[in-house]
Structure formats: C-alpha cells, structure tokens
C-alpha cells in the first residue's frame, strides 16, 4: 500500500516525539514537523514540562511569515487550553498555518477534541487520526493517567529458559548478559519511576540508577519506589544512602493501585518500570495492573524454586494474557521479547 503524504510526515513527527520519551512527565511526548510546498521547513518536540510544546518548538525555528500557508503535522491534537506555555491552537492561528494534521486525540476529557472547532473556525483545515495507533502508543503513559488515574506499568524480568530466576548466592544478582543489562539502562530512561520490593532490596541491594554513556543529560534519575509489607531497615542499602536518596520512596502495606495513583498524582509519574522478583510481579499480574512486558530469556536452564513470575495465574485459556505489537530481538546471547497487553478498549476513569 502506498504511503500517503499525511502518513509520511506524521512518521517524521513520531521520530521527533520519541526523543521526548521519559523526559516530559507529567506531560506526554509529542513531535511536530512543518511542511510548505512539500518541503520540510522546521521540526520540533516537547523536551520537558514547562518547555515549549512540540508545535511551538517547531514554529520557533521559523522567521516572520515563513509558516503562513504551511501544513503542520503533529502526533497529538494541539492543546486548546492555557497551561504553562499558552494554547498551541492560538500559536498555530497566529502563525497563519493553512492545515493541521494530527494523529491521536487528546485523552484528557476536559479538552480532548476541542482543537478541531477552534482551528476550523479560524479557517484552518484539520485532519485527525493519521497513524492514530502509533501516535497513541507514544503517549500511552499519559493516556493511562488521564483515563485510569494511574501510570502505565512496564514489567521487566530476566529468566532462564525454564522460567526461573534461581541462582547460587556466589554468582551475583544477574541471569542476563552484559548486553541485556546495558539495554535495560535505556529501558529505564523511558520510566519516570522504578518500582521494586523490599525483598529485592534486601536480597540484591540494587542501585536502580541510570548508568552508561548513552544516557541523555536531560534525563532525571527516575523515582525509586519500594513496596514492602514488613518495612525495611534502610541502613546499608544503596538506594537510601547514595546521591539520589531523595529520589527514593517507600510504601508499607499500601494497596498496589493506591501506590500507583499516588505516584501519578503526587509525583507526576506517567510510566513505571517494575523490576522485582516473581512474587510481586505475579501479584501485579493477578490484579491486572501490568500494561506491557519486557522479558529477557537467557540460554540457561536453572531449575530450582525461584520462578520469574508468580501469582495465582490464569484458570483457563481465555483468561491468559495476549500481547500485541510484539517485538523480538537478540541481545548478545539473550533474546528479548517486548509487547503490550491487549485489553481492547479501557473503561474510562470515573471523574
């Protein structure tokens, strides 16, 4: 199938928008590109909360009336209400653009869908829903907060071929290889918080920090969140004593949904990365709170009692999770599978 002109340029906008993944919470990552007479004249993306939105970032690179008569392609419906930087619809009208093409509608029900009428009243042609699924995937964390009142939850685990995480104490805390562990650092960049259990802290004493030369200087250390039933003595554990100790949060005997909701409401978290043992992973799975899986399979057969994912599990085939948009690739000696839980349409949050 031939790619349409709209799809072509929305894909460019998506490339820009992906640059903001993990940087923009509580805002969504958004990309934009301005095109005139079939030629790109500017592009932009949202860098962080409080900075220019993608449309304004792109327009700021143009002089005078350069944008007049142009088409702007945006991954998300332009905002039509005044936030920290003013409404993008007003900026587009002032710039004199002739056409606005966007992918996903704003999931915030207070003003989602409002841009079309404002722009069309000003004489600007609007085309919505271009590559909508790809654009919605880009903002899935923001959308989850708007619709369900909690962050998007990515579960990451590494396991042997027989689904275990059993390992002798003297062999350290990792089953996966160094290439996989480096890739996990990039996965952490996508998250606004990393959630683990008190048991994992006591057993492995992980740092849960961003490490490596590929980490953007624009990325803030994610919140490190510990869920525990019995509490934890903080002395001697890295996350309570290192330079990022102020970015560590502890929740004792709190319901999982309540913890997630608190992270979004109080700390502006859109996306949580769940890095923990099989018990807590299984508990989140049983409660239907996992939205995406990243699983590293390492070429080992360990046996033993430590399973990678616990919980009660599914009672029949119909209840088992299906993943969509699954991507599988090799990382060193390991294999990584990543996919989104296919739930169909989510019930909107009661407001």
Image: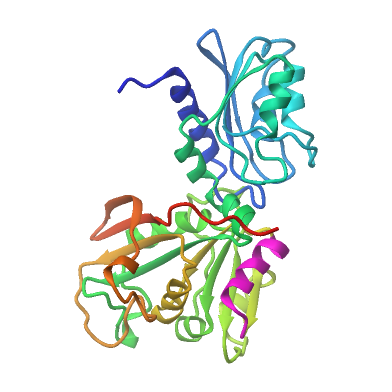
Query: Which quadrant of the structure image shows residue 79?
Result: top right
Residue at the image position 33 percent from the left and 20 percent from the top:
2
Horizontal side of residue 326 vs 149, given as left or right? left
Residue 10 spot, x, y in % from top left: 49, 28
Residue 223 in magenta? no
**Front one among 271 and 171:** 271
- Quarter of the image where the C terminus is located: bottom right
Residue at the image position 67 percent from the left and 14 percent from the top:
67
When the figure is inspected, residue 140 is found, relative to residue 125, above or below; the finding is below
Horizontal side of residue 298 vs 74, given as left or right? left
Count of marks placed on residues: 0
Q: Is residue 177 visible?
A: no
When the figure is inspected, residue 275 is found, relative to residue 76, above or below; the finding is below
Residue at the image position 28 percent from the left and 52 percent from the top:
328
Residue 318 spot, x, y in % from top left: 31, 66
- What stretch of residues is rendered in magenta? 253-267
Residue 1 spot, x, y in % from top left: 30, 23
């Amino acid at each position: 199938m031939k790619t349409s002109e709209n799809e072509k340029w929305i894909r460019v906008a998506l490339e820009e928008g992906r640059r903001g993944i993990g940087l923009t919470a509580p805002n969504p990552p958004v990309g934009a590109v301005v095109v005139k007479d079939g030629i790109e004249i500017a592009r932009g993306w949202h860098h962080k909360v409080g900075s220019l939105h993608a449309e304004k970032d792109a327009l700021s690179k143009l002089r005078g009336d350069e944008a007049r008569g142009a088409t702007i392609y945006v991954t998300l419906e332009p905002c039509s209400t005044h936030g920290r930087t003013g409404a993008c619809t007003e900026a587009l009208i002032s710039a004199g653009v002739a056409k606005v093409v966007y992918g996903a509608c704003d999931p915030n029900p207070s003003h989602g869908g409002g841009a079309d009428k404002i722009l069309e009243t000003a004489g600007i042609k609007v085309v919505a829903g271009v590559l909508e699924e790809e654009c919605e995937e880009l903002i899935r964390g923001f959308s989850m907060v708007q619709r369900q009142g909690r962050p998007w939850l990515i579960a990451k685990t590494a396991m042997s071929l027989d689904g275990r995480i059993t390992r002798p104490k003297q062999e350290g805390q990792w089953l996966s290889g160094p290439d996989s562990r480096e890739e996990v650092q990039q996965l952490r960049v996508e998250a606004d918080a990393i959630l683990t259990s008190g048991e994992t802290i006591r057993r492995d004493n992980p740092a849960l920090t961003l490490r490596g030369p590929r980490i953007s200087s624009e990325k803030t250390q994610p919140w490190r969140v510990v869920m525990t039933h019995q509490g934890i003595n903080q002395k001697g554990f890295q996350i309570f004593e290192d330079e990022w100790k102020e970015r560590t949060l502890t929740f004792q005997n709190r319901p999982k949904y309540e913890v997630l909701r608190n992270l979004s409401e109080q700390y502006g978290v859109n996306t949580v990365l769940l890095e923990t043992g099989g018990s807590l992973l299984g508990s989140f799975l049983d409660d239907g709170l996992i939205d995406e899986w990243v699983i590293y399979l390492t070429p080992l057969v360990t046996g033993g009692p430590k399973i990678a994912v616990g919980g009660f599990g599914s009672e029949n085939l119909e209840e088992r999770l299906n993943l969509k948009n699954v991507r599988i690739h090799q990382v060193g000696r390991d294999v990584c599978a990543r996919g989104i839980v296919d739930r169909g349409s989510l019930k909107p949050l009661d407001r």
